[in-house]
Image: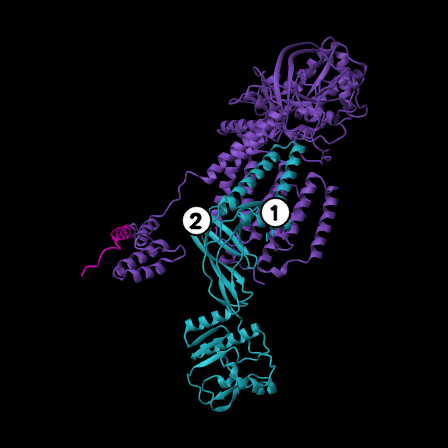
Chain colours: A cyan, B purple
C-alpha cells in the first residue's frame, strides 16, 4: 500500500497492518486519529536526504569546515522537525465517513469523507486510499473541516465497503510518511450492472415472445417495426429482424397504455445464469421506470407489486442487488 | 511559437515544482559562477530556461541521447579547461551541469527531491571557498528557498500561497537553529582528515608569494583582505616594531628574489632575548606552508617547524583558518658567527646584470672600512637624494632593473628599495638577504585585536654585521618613515590609487569598519576556527573540570534531547486550548437546547438538514429555527461578518426556547 517507503518490505507492512488491525478500535462512522494508531517511517526521499547529510558531514570532518558541520546539523534538525510536523499533520484529526449513494456494478462508489479538527491548524496534503480506491486528497487550510471523497469502483453487487482505509501524509518535506489505518464503517449498495443492448441472441424470438403471454400489458395489436430507441423494452425487441439485419429494432404495438406490467424472473431464457438474468432485469426496470410504466417485480423470494416512482425503482433495484446474498 | 507571458502563466509557473527546483539550483550555483568557465555558465542558463519552457510544452523535453551528448561534451570541455574533473572547482562545475541535465529527465517527484537534496550538497561545496558571514546569510536565504521548494513538491495541489510557504519555512528554520547550535558545539570533533585531500588546484588567494620581483607587492597591497589577526597577551608593541616575518629570500637572478634551496642547519639560536611578547595569531588560509611571526620568534609550539632563518613553517598547507601561539623577542641578538653556507649565499650576486650597482658597491667597499658606515651611507642616500616612495613606480622592464631604479627612475615601492639595498650590500661585501612579510597592522580599539591586511605586505633586508649578527635594515624606513611609524596611507601621496577600504579608513565609516572587523574576528575565532582544542577548552571552562571524549558524547545526547523537547513543546503547544469561534459556540448552545428535546444533531448533518428535522418536530418554532440557521450559515461561511450580526445571533440563541408554548 505504501508507495514510497524504503525500509519496509511488503510482508513487513502486511505484518504491521495485521498488528494494527488487532489494536484498532471497533469500526464506527467516526475516528479521531491518535498517536497510538499513528505510524511514521522515513520515505525513500528521506533516506536519500539522510545520505546527502552524511556526505556533507564526512566532507566537513575531512576538510575541517565549520560551516559544513553547521549545514549538516541544520539539515538534521530540519529533518527531525519535519518528522514532528508530518506527525502533527494527521495527529488528532477527526475522520468521518458518510453514506455512499447506491451505484451500479462498474460505476464509482463515492464515500463522502469529512475531515475535521478542533484547532485551526494548517494541515495540507492529506491523502486517503483503500485497497480498492484511488488516492484522494484533502487539505485543511486553517479551517476546522473539509470534505473529500473516497472513490472505489464497484466490483460486485450487494453491499460493498471501502475496506480498510489508509490515511497518510508526507507534508511538509516528504521525508517522512505518517499514516493511520482507519476502520471506518460504511457501506454502499451496489445494483447489478444494467445489461447493454447488445444482447447475445441465443434463442428464437418466438420463445421469448411466448413468455410474454403472461405479462399483462398493452401488447395486443402489433402495428409494425421501427428503429430501436433508447428506453424501448427489451421484450418488445424484434429479435428476428435484429438477427436478420444486425440493427436493433423494436416492435410497435398500437395500444401501449399504462397498464400494469410484470418483470419476471421466469420470463427470461432459462439457460441464462443468475448474474446475466439480474443484469437483464435491471435493464428492464430502468427502462420501464424511464417510461413511467407501472411495473412489478417478481423474482424468486421477492415479489414487489406494480407501482411507479423513484422509491419503487430503488426498492426493485435493491431487491435485485441483494438477490441470493 | 509564442513567448508572451501573461499573469496567469506566471502564477501557474510559480506553483509548479519545476520552477522551484530550477530556482533552487540556480541560487545554489550562483556563488560558484565566478569560478566557472564562461561557456558552462551559458550552457547551464540555457538548460534551465529550456526546462522552464518545457513546463508549458512538455513535448519539448529533450531525448536521452541528446542529454548524453551534452554530458560527454561538457566533461571533455571541463577536462581541457581544468586538466581534471575532480578538483574543487572542476568538480563543482561538473556537478552543476549534471544537475541541470538531470532536470530534463522524467518529471517526477522523486527527481525533484533528488535535485533538492543534491542542491544542499552544492551549498557545502561553496563553503570550501568562502566561510564569511555574508556567505552564510546568503546560504540561509537559499536554504529557505530550498525548504519552500520541498513544500511545493509535497503540497499536492493544496492552495498554500507562497507567503504561507515562506512563513512556514522561516518558522521551521528558526526552530531548527537552536538544535543546530547545540549539535555544533557538542558534536565530538575529530582531528585530522579522514582521507587524503586531493591536491589543490591553483586557487587565486591573495597573499605573499615565495618570490619577489618589482611590482609584486605593490599589486598585492591593493587588496584589503585580512592576512591574519593577532591577539596580544599583554600590551601591544609600537607600530614600528611590528615586523611580521614570513620568508627569507637568498637567491637573486638580477630581477627576481627566490628562496632557492632550503639550507638545513641546526636550530638557530638567539644570544640574548629581552622584551618578550606573548601573542596568538589567527592566520587566514593562504594555501602555503609558511607562517608569520613577529621578529624574532623565541618560543614556538611543537607542531611548527623552525627553520634556520628564524622562519616558521607548518606541517601542511594552510587551507583553513589556522591559529598558533608564539613568544617573540623585540630586543634580540643573533648568533655571532656566520656559517660558511650563509656567507657564500649572502654574498652571491648575478655577475652579468646590474653592473652599475655592482660597481657602486665595490666603490663603497673601498670608500668605507666599516660595514656599519656603508649601511648608514646608503640609507642616507635614499633619504636625501631624489628618491620617492610610490605605489605606482615607472616600469623597469630591462635586464638591469636595479640599475634602472637606482640611477634613473628613483621612484619605487618597498620591494624596489629592499631589492636594490640588498644587492648593494652584497656588492660591497656585506652578507645580506631579503625578508618578506608584513609590517604594521590596525588595532581595533573595541577588541584590542591587531588586524594585518594584505595592504600591509612589506619587504626589508637583513645584513650580517661583525659582532652583531643578522641585523634588520628597512630601507623603506629611510625613504618613507611614515610608512613604518604610522601606516601606508600616511606615506603615500593623496592622489595615489588605493582600494576602497583604505580610502574609507579616514572617514566616518572607520568606526563601523572596526565593529565589522570585531565581529569578523569573533566569527573566525569561534565559528570557523572551532575545533577539537577549542571544544575541549570551552566545555572544560563551562563545567569547571577536564573533559574527555565520552563526556562530550554524553553532553551531546543530553543537550540535544533537552533542546528537542523544548522545541517540540513549542510545536505541540499543549497549553493552547482549542479555540472555538464564538459563532460555533453559540450554535452549539442552540443544538444543546434542541437535544434536550430529544433532537440530536448528527456530526455529518448540515445545519439546514438539521433545521428541517427540528422544524418537523417543533413546527411552532419554525421562524426562530430558520432565522438562527440562516444567520449561522451566513456568519460561518460568508466572508464579511459584522459584530452586530454576531451579537444578534447570540441574542437569538439565548432567547430560543424550544419548550415554550406558542402564544395564541
For label 1, count other residues whose C-alpha is less than 10 Å away and answer few (under 14), some (14-19) or many (20+).
Answer: many
* Residue A45: image tag: 1
Q: In this view of the protein, can residue A249 be seen by the observer?
A: no
Name the residue nearer the viewer: A175 or B279: A175
Chain containing mark 2? A
On the same chain, marks 1 and 2? The answer is: yes
Residue hosting label 2: A117
Q: Position of residue B305 (x, y in %)?
A: 72, 20
Foreground tag (1 vs 2): 2
Residue B245 vs residue A91: left or right?
Answer: right
Query: Numbered disc 1: what chain?
Result: A
Query: What residue appears at the point 54 percent right and 28 percent down from the top-left corner?
Result: B517
Quarter occupied by residue A280: bottom right
Q: Residues within 10 Å of mark 2 (few under 14, many from 20)?
A: many
Q: Nearest the camera: B165 or B644?
A: B644
Q: Nearer the viewer, residue B80 or A173?
A: A173
User: Quick check: B20 above or below B514?
Assistant: below
Please tell me whether mark 1 sits on a helix, a strand or a loop.
Answer: helix
- Residues rendered magenta in the picture: B647-664
Q: Position of residue B472 (x, y in %)?
A: 68, 16
B409 vs B463: above or below: below
Q: Position of residue B7 (x, y in %)?
A: 49, 57
Magenta stretch: includes residue B648: yes
Disc 1/disc 2 C-alpha distance (Å)? 29 Å
Q: Nearer the viewer, residue B76 or A209?
A: A209
Amino acid at each position: 500500500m505504501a508507495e514510497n517507503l524504503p525500509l519496509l518490505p511488503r510482508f513487513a507492512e502486511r505484518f504491521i497492518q495485521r498488528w494494527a488491525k488487532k489494536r484498532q478500535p471497533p469500526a464506527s462512522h467516526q475516528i479521531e486519529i491518535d498517536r497510538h494508531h499513528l505510524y511514521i517511517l522515513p520515505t525513500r526521499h528521506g533516506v536519500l536526504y539522510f545520505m546527502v547529510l552524511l556526505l556533507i558531514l564526512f566532507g566537513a570532518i575531512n576538510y575541517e569546515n565549520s560551516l559544513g558541520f553547521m549545514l549538516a546539523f541544520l539539515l538534521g534538525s530540519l529533518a527531525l522537525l519535519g518528522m514532528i510536523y508530518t506527525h502533527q499533520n494527521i495527529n488528532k484529526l477527526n475522520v468521518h465517513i458518510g453514506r455512499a449513494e447506491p451505484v451500479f456494478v462498474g460505476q464509482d462508489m463515492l464515500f463522502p469523507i469529512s475531515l475535521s479538527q478542533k484547532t485551526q491548524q494548517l494541515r495540507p496534503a492529506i491523502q486517503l486510499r483503500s485497497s480498492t480506491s484511488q488516492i484522494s486528497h484533502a487539505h485543511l487550510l486553517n479551517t476546522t473541516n473539509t470534505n473529500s471523497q473516497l472513490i472505489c469502483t464497484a466490483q460486485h453487487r450487494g453491499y460493498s465497503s471501502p475496506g480498510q482505509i489508509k490515511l497518510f501524509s508526507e507534508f511538509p518535506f516528504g521525508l517522512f510518511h505518517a499514516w493511520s489505518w482507519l476502520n471506518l464503517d460504511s457501506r454502499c449498495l451496489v445494483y447489478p450492472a444494467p445489461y447493454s443492448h447488445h444482447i447475445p441472441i441465443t434463442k428464437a424470438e418466438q420463445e421469448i415472445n411466448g413468455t410474454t403471454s403472461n405479462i399483462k400489458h398493452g401488447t395486443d395489436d402489433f402495428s409494425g417495426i421501427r428503429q430501436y430507441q433508447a428506453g424501448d423494452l427489451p421484450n418488445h425487441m424484434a429479435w428476428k429482424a435484429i438477427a436478420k439485419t444486425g440493427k436493433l429494432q423494436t416492435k410497435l404495438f398500437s395500444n401501449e397504455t399504462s397498464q400494469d406490467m410484470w418483470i419476471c424472473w421466469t420470463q427470461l431464457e432459462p439457460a441464462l445464469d443468475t448474474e446475466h438474468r439480474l443484469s437483464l432485469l435491471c435493464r428492464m426496470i430502468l427502462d420501464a421506470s424511464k417510461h413511467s410504466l407501472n411495473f412489478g417485480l417478481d423474482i424468486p423470494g421477492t415479489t414487489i407489486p406494480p407501482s411507479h416512482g423513484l422509491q419503487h425503482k430503488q426498492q426493485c433495484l435493491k431487491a435485485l442487488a441483494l438477490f441470493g446474498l | 511559437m509564442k513567448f508572451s507571458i501573461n499573469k496567469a502563466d506566471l502564477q501557474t509557473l510559480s506553483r509548479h515544482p519545476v520552477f522551484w527546483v530550477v530556482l533552487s539550483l540556480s541560487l545554489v550555483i550562483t556563488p560558484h559562477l565566478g569560478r566557472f568557465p564562461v561557456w558552462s555558465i551559458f550552457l547551464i542558463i540555457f538548460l534551465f530556461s529550456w526546462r522552464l519552457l518545457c513546463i508549458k510544452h512538455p513535448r519539448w523535453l529533450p531525448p536521452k541521447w541528446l542529454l548524453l551528448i551534452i554530458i560527454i561534451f561538457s566533461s571533455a570541455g571541463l577536462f581541457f579547461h581544468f586538466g581534471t574533473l575532480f578538483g574543487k572547482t572542476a568538480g563543482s562545475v561538473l556537478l552543476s551541469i549534471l544537475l541541470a541535465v538531470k532536470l530534463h529527465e522524467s518529471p517526477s517527484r522523486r527527481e525533484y527531491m533528488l535535485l533538492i537534496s543534491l542542491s544542499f550538497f552544492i551549498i557545502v561545496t561553496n563553503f570550501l571557498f568562502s566561510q564569511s558571514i555574508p556567505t552564510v546569510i546568503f546560504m540561509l536565504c537559499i536554504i529557505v528557498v530550498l525548504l519552500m521548494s520541498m513544500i511545493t513538491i509535497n503540497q499536492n495541489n493544496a492552495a498554500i500561497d507562497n507567503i504561507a510557504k515562506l512563513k512556514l519555512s522561516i518558522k521551521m528554520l528558526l526552530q531548527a537553529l537552536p538544535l543546530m547550535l547545540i549539535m555544533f558545539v557538542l558534536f565530538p570533533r575529530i582531528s585530522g582528515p579522514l582521507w587524503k585531500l586531493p591536491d589543490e588546484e591553483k586557487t587565486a588567494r591573495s597573499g605573499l608569494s615565495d618570490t619577489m620581483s618589482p611590482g609584486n607587492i605593490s599589486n598585492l597591497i591593493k587588496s584589503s583582505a585580512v592576512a591574519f589577526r593577532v591577539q596580544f597577551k599583554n600590551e601591544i608593541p609600537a607600530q614600528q616594531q611590528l615586523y611580521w616575518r614570513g620568508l627569507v629570500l637568498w637567491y637573486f637572478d638580477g630581477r627576481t628574489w627566490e628562496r632557492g634551496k632550503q639550507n638545513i642547519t641546526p636550530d638557530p639560536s638567539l644570544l640574548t632575548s629581552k622584551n618578550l611578547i606573548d601573542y596568538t595569531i589567527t592566520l587566514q588560509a593562504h594555501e602555503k606552508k609558511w607562517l608569520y611571526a613577529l621578529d624574532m620568534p623565541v618560543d614556538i609550539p611543537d607542531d611548527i617547524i623552525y627553520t634556520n632563518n628564524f622562519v616558521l613553517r607548518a606541517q601542511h598547507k594552510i587551507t583553513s583558518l589556522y591559529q598558533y601561539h608564539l613568544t617573540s623577542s623585540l630586543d634580540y641578538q643573533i648568533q655571532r658567527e656566520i656559517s660558511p653556507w650563509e656567507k657564500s649565499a649572502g654574498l652571491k650576486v648575478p655577475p652579468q646584470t646590474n653592473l652599475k650597482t655592482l660597481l657602486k658597491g665595490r666603490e663603497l667597499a673601498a670608500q668605507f672600512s666599516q660595514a656599519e658606515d656603508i649601511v648608514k651611507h646608503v640609507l642616507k642616500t635614499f633619504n636625501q637624494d631624489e628618491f620617492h616612495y610610490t605605489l605606482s613606480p615607472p616600469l623597469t622592464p630591462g635586464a638591469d632593473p636595479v640599475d634602472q631604479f637606482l640611477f634613473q627612475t628613483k621612484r619605487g615601492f618597498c620591494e624596489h628599495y629592499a631589492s636594490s639595498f640588498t644587492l648593494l650590500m652584497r656588492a660591497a661585501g656585506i652578507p645580506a638577504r631579503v625578508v618578506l612579510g608584513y609590517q604594521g597592522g590596525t588595532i581595533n580599539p573595541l577588541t584590542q585585536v591587531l588586524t594585518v591586511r594584505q595592504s600591509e605586505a612589506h619587504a626589508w633586508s637583513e645584513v650580517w654585521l661583525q659582532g652583531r649578527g643578522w641585523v634588520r635594515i628597512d630601507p623603506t624606513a629611510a625613504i618613507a618613515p611614515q610608512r613604518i611609524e604610522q601606516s601606508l596611507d600616511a606615506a603615500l601621496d593623496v592622489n595615489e590609487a588605493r582600494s576602497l577600504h583604505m580610502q574609507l579608513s579616514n572617514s566616518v565609516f572607520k568606526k563601523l569598519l572596526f565593529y565589522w572587523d570585531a565581529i569578523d574576528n569573533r566569527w573566525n575565532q569561534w565559528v570557523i576556527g572551532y575545533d577539537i582544542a577549542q571544544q575541549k577548552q570551552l566545555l572544560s571552562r563551562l563545567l569547571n573540570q577536564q573533559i574527555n571524549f565520552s563526556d562530550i558524547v554524553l553532553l551531546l545526547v543530553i543537550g540535544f534531547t533537552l533542546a528537542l523537547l523544548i522545541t517540540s513543546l513549542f510545536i505541540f503547544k499543549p497549553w493552547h486550548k482549542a479555540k472555538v469561534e464564538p459563532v460555533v459556540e453559540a450554535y452549539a448552545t442552540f443544538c444543546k437546547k434542541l437535544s434536550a428535546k430529544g433532537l440530536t444533531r448528527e456530526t455529518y448533518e448540515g445545519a439546514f438538514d438539521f433545521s428541517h428535522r427540528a422544524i418537523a418536530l417543533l413546527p411552532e418554532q419554525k421562524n426562530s429555527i430558520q432565522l438562527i440557521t440562516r444567520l449561522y450559515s451566513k456568519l460561518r461561511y460568508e466572508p464579511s461578518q459584522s459584530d452586530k450580526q454576531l451579537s444578534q445571533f447570540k441574542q437569538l440563541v439565548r432567547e430560543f426556547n424550544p419548550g415554550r408554548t406558542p402564544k395564541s
